[in-house]
Amino acid sequence: MFIGHIAVGFASKALAPRTSLVVLIAAPVFADLIWPIFLSLGWEHVRIDPGNTAFTPLGFVDYPISHSLITSVGWGLLVGAVYCAVTRYTRGAVVAALGVVSHWVLDFVTHGPDMPLYPGGPRVGLGLWDSVAGTIAVESVMWGFGLWIYLRQTRALDRTGTYAFWFFVALLLLIYGLNAQGQPPPSVGALIITAYAGWMIPMWAWWIDRHRKVREAG
């Protein structure tokens, strides 16, 4: 799941219109943002394993800190609490917290049985990634719906708000298309570097949101 997570962030603008898109998108991809940190520390592990699933050539050996259900809930509570303390916007804090937890739910649908319920606990997963067509279909529907909601909620203030937004959309689709080909990274080290580059996604969302405005009700 990639654009599906980001689609959740776009759609969340309807629930928390005062919350910046950087937070709304960072929340549902939070687990993947912190994942390379734990890989770098050697606390979590992944292997390059072509054929592990039809959609991805990665074998997720263990990631109990970033991707277990119980720690996802904990990370969500932390993110929500920090956001509420900074902004005093309770609705936004709740949406951000739920966004963090949504990552585990969507990964549970797509991954095979490698999603831990808690560190050291049983692993589950419905295995949508075993079907490339099914994965693309589900994520495409989510992507279209999320974009539609975000565009209904906001309007561009200037050309940057239009062009930066659509370039962002096109770039994410390009990345998704390359990932869908299932080409394995050359090494785990290269994978970690690529995963760190994912931090640019919420930063770009922050830039976009500075050039867009929530539409007036009615």
Image (spheres, rainbow, N blue to C red):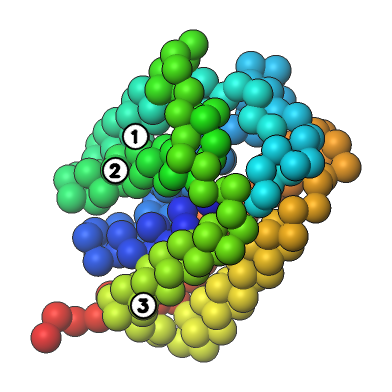
Mark 2 residue crowding within 10 angstroms, few (<14) / some (14–19) / many (20+): many
Residue 65 at what x, y percent from top left? 50, 22
Residue tagged by mark 2? 98
Position above or below: 202 against 156: above
Residue visible at 62% across and 58% down in the picture: 132
Residue tagged by mark 1? 76
Residue visible at 51% across and 21% down in the picture: 64
**Which of the two discs, 3 and 1, sits closer to the camera?**
3
Position above or below: 66 against 149: above
Mark 1 residue crowding within 10 angstroms, few (<14) / some (14–19) / many (20+): many
Please state which amino acid type lies under the numbered disc 3: Trp
Considering every residue shown, the one lying at the far top of the view is: 120
Please state which amino acid type lies under the numbered disc 2: Leu
| Real-space Cα separation, disc 3 to disc 2, in angstroms | 20 Å
Q: Earlier in the sequence, mark 3 or mark 1?
A: 1
Residue 106 at what x, y percent from top left? 42, 46
Asked whether disc 2 touches disc 1, contact meaning CB atoms under 8 Å apart, the reply is yes
Residue tagged by mark 3? 148
Position above or below: 24 against 75: below
Please state which amino acid type lies under the numbered disc 1: Gly
Residue 171 at what x, y percent from top left? 65, 70
Q: Secondary structure at mark 1?
A: helix
Horizontally, residue 55 falls left or right of residue 136, namely right
Residue visible at 28% across and 76% down in the picture: 153
Mark 3 residue crowding within 10 angstroms, few (<14) / some (14–19) / many (20+): some
Q: Is residue 36 visible?
A: yes
